[in-house]
Amino acid sequence: MRMRQARWIFVLGLGLLAGTAAHASATPATYTFTCGATAGKGINLTLNSFTLQTSVTPNTTGSAAGSKPAYAATIHFLSNDFYSILQTDLIDGVMLSSCTLTERVVLNSSSTGTDIYEWTFKNILFTSVTAIGSDASNTSSGGTDVQTGYMQATFNFNQVSFTYTIEGPAT
């Protein structure tokens, strides 16, 4: 069991490192987050950014001594109507069976294709949903000095799988 947990931690770390290396000579990445139907509507978000966290909590009591992995993720997206769906799921304690986060990186102009990093989460439970606004001096507004609002959702999950693929040359 411990070896399996270590393998998942390694796979997550390897995926994040591969994504970082690919970004060095690529066009900006695009991120999407999709889940099956919830509150009568599927979730399909274009993300601004995300963070994935894997931590290990030591369990030193009883016959279950060892380590237990804990997984969490935070997604950032522009304001839209999915905020109310995520908020309802949070308040009602809805557990989603599966969600997918996909990162697509089109390589440079002499492209060999598109790198695709995909994380599939199982048993997702939202722990917070936040609406965030900023003043007109924010640095992420592309120099236009406009007020920017975005949403943030944090969720826990108990299992994750990671895949990396390359699609044919970009056109």
Image (spheres, rainbow, N blue to C red):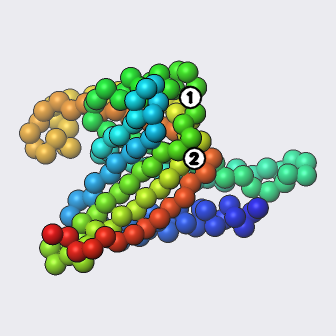
Rendered residue at 80%/57% (across/down): 66
CB contact under 8 Å: marks 1 and 2: no
Rendered residue at 16%/35% (across/down): 137
Q: Amino acid at mark 2?
A: Lys
Residue 156 visible in rendering: no
Looking at the rendered image, the quarter that the N terminus falls into is bottom right
Please tell me in which quadrant of the rendered image residue 143 appears: top left
Please tell me in which quadrant of the rendered image residue 35 appears: top left
Q: Residues within 10 Å of mark 2 (few under 14, many from 20)?
A: some
| Image mark count | 2
Q: Is residue 58 above or below residue 141?
A: below
Residue wearing tag 1: 94
Q: Is residue 56 left or right of residue 25?
A: right
Element marked by disc 1: loop
Residue 129 horizontal/vertical position (percent): 44, 29
Rendered residue at 19%/43% (across/down): 139
